[in-house]
Image: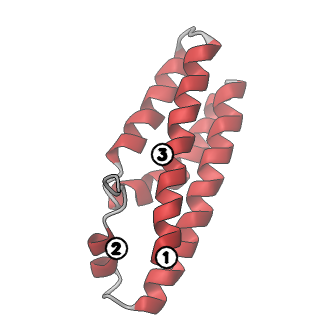
Amino acid sequence: MEDPYVDVDLVSNLLYNEEKYIKEFSEASIESFTEFKEKFTQFFLAGDMDMLRQTGHKIKPVAQMLNLDELLVMYEHSKDLLATSNPMKEKEELVEKVVGYCDKVIHQFEEMK
């Protein structure tokens, strides 16, 4: 099994090891990361910086809390790519990385429910 992105112990400790709260947090996180990857893809590929930022600001606090630094780095990189002229191929590759990362995070939260 590959290294987990979500630190299960961290989540458990934040939620006082209460199974009910861990399940609720997992469900909310699944919704948040699903929404993020969909909106990230839509707004990044459309070149909509304002909506991309709005989308990023919604996921950023939970990503920071969970130490998902790689996702934050990819998000910041996406803003840099939009600010400059870059080939669509490079943007599509970043979308694939972000979606893949989010899918793994979502999968881990599904296992925690």
Calculate the distance from the C-alpha at mark 3 to the C-alpha at mark 1. 19 Å
Question: Which badge, 1 or 2, comes first in the chain's sequence?
Answer: 2
Which residue does the image show at 67% across and 24% down from the upper left?
A: 47
Task: Give the SS element for disc 2.
Answer: helix
Quadrant location, the N terminus: bottom left
Question: Which badge, 3 or 1, comes first in the chain's sequence?
Answer: 1
Would you place residue 112 above or below residue 85 in this image? below
87 on left or right of 72: right
Color encoding of the figure: secondary structure
Task: Give the SS element for disc 3.
Answer: helix
Calculate the distance from the C-alpha at mark 3 to the C-alpha at mark 2. 18 Å
Would you place residue 21 above or below residue 7 in this image? below
Which residue does the image show at 27% across and 74% down from the upper left?
A: 9
**Residue type beneath disc 1:** Phe
From the viewer's side, name the closer residue of 73 and 4.
4
Whether pointer 3 and pointer 1 mark residues with C-beta atoms closer than 8 Å, the reply is no
- Dot 3 crowding, Cα within 10 Å, few <14, some 14–19, many 20+: some
Whether pointer 1 and pointer 2 mark residues with C-beta atoms closer than 8 Å, the reply is yes
Residue where numbered disc 1 is placed? 25
**Residue type beneath disc 3:** Tyr
- Dot 1 crowding, Cα within 10 Å, few <14, some 14–19, many 20+: some
Disc on res. 101: 3
Which residue does the image show at 44% across and 34% down from the upper left?
A: 74
Q: Residue 37: x, y in percent? A: 61, 46
Nearer to us of marks 3 and 2 is: 3
Residue where numbered disc 2 is placed? 11
Quarter of the figure with residue 67: bottom left
Q: Residue 92: x, y in percent? A: 61, 24
